[in-house]
Structures are given as structure tokens and as C-alpha cells.
Image (spheres, rainbow, N blue to C red):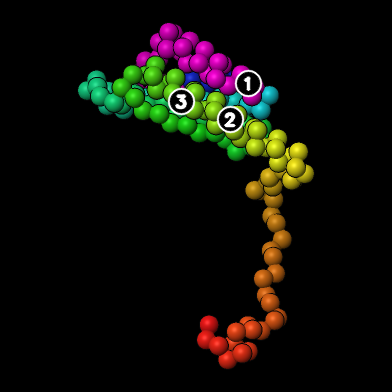
Amino acid sequence: MQIDIQARRFTLTDALRSHAERRLRLALTCCDDHIQRIVMRLSDVNGPRGGVDKHCHLQVVLAGLPDVVIEDTEADMYVAINRAADRAGRTLIRKVNRQQTLLKQGHPLPLDLDVEQPALNTTFNEPNKQQDRGLKA
């Protein structure tokens, strides 16, 4: 599991980095096979003024599924990290279970958005039956 932790507008301490890595591994290890990369951006929005301004932006890049993006803002950075990691873990489990259920039911995998799909023909040659009977639509 590749983890990239970035700090903005404050200095990232070893203790905070270690805590973030530990929480991410704990929350996301169950779906490790699906995870390509994790990017965590931590920021102190208000700086030294304080307040509920410790922001954690978490992006989990998955193989074959859309990314999971979680954001949390708290007064304490450790709490923001904990909540974001827990929410990401629950969301990831839900997405992976949903994909496995769809595959078991015989549904195809989601189409790649970069592949151009043929347009559907929506022209109908059959006249509106209400108008044929003289009814207003």
C-alpha cells in the first residue's frame, strides 16, 4: 500500500505522520488488493488563529473502481485523521462488496469512460396513440 502524506500550512511531525500511516493501514488493510495509492493532504486552514480548522483530505485510488475521496475538518488534526480514515474504510468495503455482488449476478464491469460508446437510436416511427384518438396530450 503506497501512502503519500502531505502537509499544507504547517509542519508535519514524525508523530503525526506515524499516526496517520497507522490509522490508514488499520482502516484500509481489509481491501489492500484493490488499493493502488493513498494520498492524504493535511492542512491548517486558519493557521495560528485556531478554531475548527484542521482539515484532512483523503483520496484512495482504486484498481478498476472510482476513487474514494473523503474530507473531514475538526479542531484536532488527530481526530480529523481518525474520522477520515474510518469513513474511507467503510466506504471502500461498501464499494468492493457492491462490485463483487454485481459480478456474481453476472453484471458486466463498469465501462471505461474513455471509450466512446455508440449512440442509441431514439427515433420512433410509431405515432402517438393519444393524438390518433383525438385526445390532448
Q: Which residues are magenta?
A: 6-32
Q: Which residue is mark 1?
A: 30
Residue 29: x and y in percent read 61, 19
Q: Which residue is mark 2?
A: 92
Mark sitting earlier along the chain (1/3)? 1
Amino acid beneath label 3 = Ala
How many numbered circles does the render carry? 3
Q: Main secondary structure of the magenta part?
A: helix
- Residue nearer the viewer, 113 or 125: 125
Q: Is residue 36 above or below residue 99?
A: above
Element carrying mark 1: helix
Quarter holding residue 44: top left
Amino acid beneath label 2 = Leu
Residue 104: x and y in percent read 76, 38
Residue, far bottom: 134
Q: Which residue is mark 3?
A: 84
Q: Within 10 angstroms of label 1, few (less than 14), some, or many (20 or more) residues?
A: few
The residue depicted at 61 percent of the width and 90 percent of the height is: 133
Whether the magenta-drawn stretch holds residue 14 is answered as yes
The N terminus appears in which quarter of the rendering? top right
Mark sitting earlier along the chain (3/2)? 3
Q: Is residue 10 above or below residue 136?
A: above
CB under 8 Å between discs 2 and 1: yes
The residue depicted at 46 percent of the width and 25 percent of the height is: 84
* Residue 122 - label: none
Amino acid beneath label 1 = Cys
Residue 22: x and y in percent read 52, 12
Whether the magenta-drawn stretch holds residue 127 is answered as no
